[in-house]
Image (cartoon, rainbow, N blue to C red):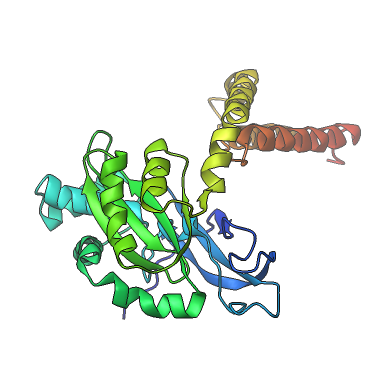
Amino acid sequence: MKQPRRYGALPRARYRPEWTACPHCGTALAFSHPVWAKPIQSLTRTEHVTSLGFRCGNAACPFGRTVHRSAQAEARQVKGSGYGLDVVARIGHLRFGQHRTRGEIWRELHEQTAVQISERHVQNLLEVYLALLRASQQDLGARLAASVAEHGGLILSLDGLQPEQGNEQLWVVREVLSGAVLGAENLQQATAPMLERLLRPIRAAERPVLGVVSDAQESIRVAVAAVFPGVPHQLCQYHALREAAEPLWEADRHLLVEAKKELRGLREVEERTRRPEQPEPTDPASAVVLDTVLALRQTVRERGTLPFDFAGLRALEALGDLGQTLDRCLEKRGTPA
């Protein structure tokens, strides 16, 4: 029996829809339930991701039961899998771009990334990659009919993943409300004409498009305007917030660097406390000093993530709490022993 994979404590990410109002009646969306929640392994990190589902708050809306979900959350994962789409794109690139064997792909992922995966599952994700590329070759009109009947139209998301810098990108078009992949293609350059070619089969299906969600890349904006003129184009808040937070992120990173500089004397304190003839101290005061040194080092090892998880601020807050603890200890003037 296959044992469940254990990750330990994971950072959490929660996503809500990029639009806040019902595309049919304009009423504000209200939280309904989590659509899915699971650990997702990407090439750079593992997180526990939750996609929050929202519904129209208007009881009279004809599509009040439609569950709206985040396009960004859907773009991070493969349905039914715990691996990010970037892992799938990397595997496809190594197989068809560099002609690696399954074993070679597994060894590269094992040695160069933090992805936990078996050699057999590399084959499974390779089949997912091929299924994505085949999505553009199906009859979209028939596939989308049920989704249009249920939700009153389509909300599209367009995103690209680049497995390695300087190589081709895997571009994927999704229908957000149903989670269906409508098209995928490897592109050497994500120019507006190439992205238009990826979007035109969806327009040819002649199904109503309620909106498009993407990042603020200029070629995407031009392609969407050319293929779907007049359709609302919502820029992804996550990407917008990342760009807006860049100056604060740099300031926070500088703050953490300065905090590390202030603690450079820790090594000298530790060496003076540990004696060569007795590395582990027996007196309570020396033990407290060494515990404090360890706590200070762990504090400045904080790592943040864009847009608003600032490691420097968290480190300073933790240093302040540690300082208050030491002050209380000093006020007691030692121990009864």
- Left of 109 or right of it: where is 235? right
* Residue at image location 39% in from the left, 67% down from the top: 5
Q: How many marks?
A: 0
Rendering coords of residue 56 (x, y %): 65, 71
Q: Quadrant of residue 251?
A: top right
Above or below 87: residue 204: below
Rendering coords of residue 128 (x, y %): 25, 65
Using the rendered image of the protein, determine whether residue 182 is visible from the camera's viewpoint. yes
Above or below 275: residue 308: below
Nearest the eye: 59 or 104: 59
Nearest the eye: 32 or 104: 32
Using the rendered image of the protein, determine whether residue 42 is visible from the camera's viewpoint. no
* Residue at image location 35% in from the left, 57% down from the top: 173
Rendering coords of residue 299 (x, y %): 63, 36
Nearest the eye: 322 or 180: 180
* Residue at image location 30% in from the left, 77% down from the top: 142
